[in-house]
Amino acid sequence: MDNLDDFRKSWDRSTKYTRALLEHVESLEPHQVKSTLSINRAREVIAQLTQPMADITDNIERTIRLNQDKIDELRSAKSKGKSLERSLHFERIEIDVERLREPRTVCKHPECVELKEVAGVKRPIYKSFCHDPCGLTDVEEEVMGHVQMMNCAAIDRSGYCRKCRHHWQQHLHIRYTQTERIVQDIDADVQAKLDANASDLVVKREAIKALKKKVKDLEKSLKEVQDAAIKFGLYLKKKSITPYNDAMIEYLDLLINEEKRQISHCSACGQDTTKNEERLETLEQNRTKYGQRIKLLETEMSKSNDSYAVLDEQGVDDQVKKLYNLKHFGKDLQAMREMVEWSKASGYREQELRPRIAKNMSTLSWLSSPVSNTASAVGSRVRGAVGAVSSAAGGLFGGRRGSASQPSNSTRSYDSDEEMKEEDDRSGTYQPRGTKRGQAKTDSPTRPGGYSFRERKRRF
């Protein structure tokens, strides 16, 4: 062989690099697969907590303002009678999440939204269910104007809704609803003063003292949530392989834009937007503070400051449990996160692929026998199949005659011995019925039947 040397060189080169690869793999430190699963799980939990943490932060700040207004009202001399009783007890904004039986498509256009005032802030409530239920897949939940909304049955070819006649970019897909309500927590000491018919001045002092304590607890909870959000953001930035986009910043931008649209719509309708403007200002401040603290911690981390160490997977789990134990808002945060997790899981559709099997494949049913069959059983089936094919080929091309169109004596019927004799005389193989085959008339070998036909076929 002319290229034998080239083959040797190729083999030597392949062997060299294969051995180098095996040596490199052998030198690597074993990695716990559980660690990779823990990282993925931690990232998934943080992603599910992003929106609930932003909403809880907003609710805590609004609750603080609500009770601060109560304190200011109690300090004024105007609060008397029923007005005084309404201002005595602590109130907080609670978020109720309700799971829908089926997903639905709703419209977020101002004309299709009902405004509900909660603590002075006007909140949108969807009233136009454009497609209920909606079986749309591959659509991101709670995202207005997602590209897959064009494929919803409620949207016509022109891109407008058949029910509300608004553009598809004003619609979104939801699996649960989230509403707000004010809950009052009655303070035992204040109620005791009221039951004892204490003076208004004594009751006010006790109520102000209790509300200040509640507000202080809220500020502490607010700081814990904000710190946890920053720690989660740094963790994701460190563990991310691809360029990381801060989900908290994106969601705060979404809330800011929605609040601006809400203020614009309410102003056009002549409604009071003072509380909404306060909420907008707070959201913008939170976004600015969050970005500044992230940059500050990144700078400190680059200086190898141990006090700003990034969380590990166990630290993420401990931080999540700490958030769930927050006073007043821990249970709300846990319920919202579980609802987001359920929504993501419900939106996942596993596609089952089944191979197409032709109808004539049923003749190969013997291939579906269990793997546990012995080799002898498989061999007998194969030999049977081969024998069947050989018999069919012999019947088509073989026989004792020189032509494929002439049947053999074993299959052709004759009316008399004379007819059979005339047929066999042409080949010299005539034997009367009931007699033994005698000695050959000639010493020359006789070609087997069908030889001339196979020879012609081979030449052809």
Image (cartoon, helix red, strand yellow):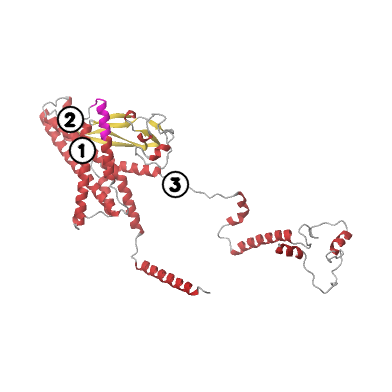
Quick one: 363 or 79, which is closer to the camera? 363
Q: Quadrant of residue 97?
A: top left
Q: Which residues are magenta?
A: 259-271
Rendered position, 426 above or below 189 = below
Q: Position of residue 451 (x, y in %)?
A: 75, 65
Nearer to us: label 1 or label 2: 1
Secondary structure of the residue carrying tag 1 is helix
Quick one: 364 or 72, which is closer to the camera? 364
At label 2, which amino acid type do we have?
Ser
**Of callouts 3 and 1, the N-terminal one:** 1
**Of callouts 1 and 2, the N-terminal one:** 2
Q: Residue at x 31, y 53 (%)?
A: 240
Rendered position, 427 above or below 82 = below
| Label disc, if present, on residue 87 of the rendered structure | 2
| Label disc, if present, on residue 350 of the rendered structure | 3
Nearer to us: label 3 or label 2: 3
Secondary structure of the residue carrying tag 3 is loop
Name the residue beneath numbered marker 1.
Answer: 282
